Amino acid sequence: MANPKRRTSKRRRDLRRSHDAIPVVASNNCSNCGATTRPHHVCGDCGYYAGRVVVEVETA
């Protein structure tokens, strides 16, 4: 079996891991209620999307 001839440096190790970071999820504020929502998704709090009601949301 093959064995590494040299130890992997910290720099080379970290450069290899540069793509493993968790990406930051974009967020917007709902134009109707101001809650934080993902872009191009229906607001989970009020059910609005693009200025109109898309989903009926139950109020507790």
Image (cartoon, rainbow, N blue to C red):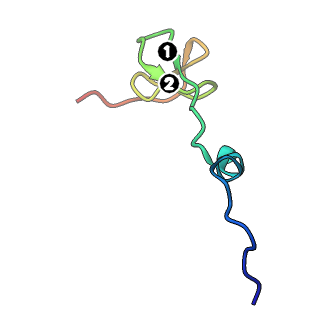
Query: Given contact means CB atoms under 8 Å apart, are the residues at marks 1 and 2 in contact?
Result: yes
Image-based side of 15 in relation to 32, left or right: right
Q: As drawn, which residue projects farthest toward the front?
A: 6
Residue at 64% x, 47% y is: 14
Of 18 and 45, the residue lying toward us: 18
Query: Which quadrant of the view contains residue 7?
Result: bottom right
Nearest to the observer: residue 20 or residue 13: 13
Quadrant position of the C terminus in the picture: top left
To which residue does mark 2 refer?
A: 37
List x then y, in percent, for residue 12: 71, 51
Other-residue count near label 2 (Cα within 10 Å), few / some / many at <14 / 14–19 / ≥20:
some
Residue at horizontal 62 percent and vertical 50 percent from the top: 10
Q: Is residue 3 left or right of residue 58?
A: right
| Of 31 and 13, the residue lying toward us | 13
Identified by mark 2, the residue type is Thr
| Pointer 1 or 2: first along the chain | 1
Q: Is residue 17 above or below residue 38?
A: below
Image position, residue 42 (x, y; %): 54, 27
Q: Secondary structure at mark 1?
A: loop
- Please give the name of the residue rendered at 68% of the width and 60% of the height, measured from the top-left corner: 8
- Alpha-carbon distance for marks 1 and 2? 6 Å
Q: Amino acid at mark 1?
A: Cys
Q: Residue furthest left?
A: 60
Q: Is residue 22 above or below residue 3?
A: above
Residue of label 1 = 30
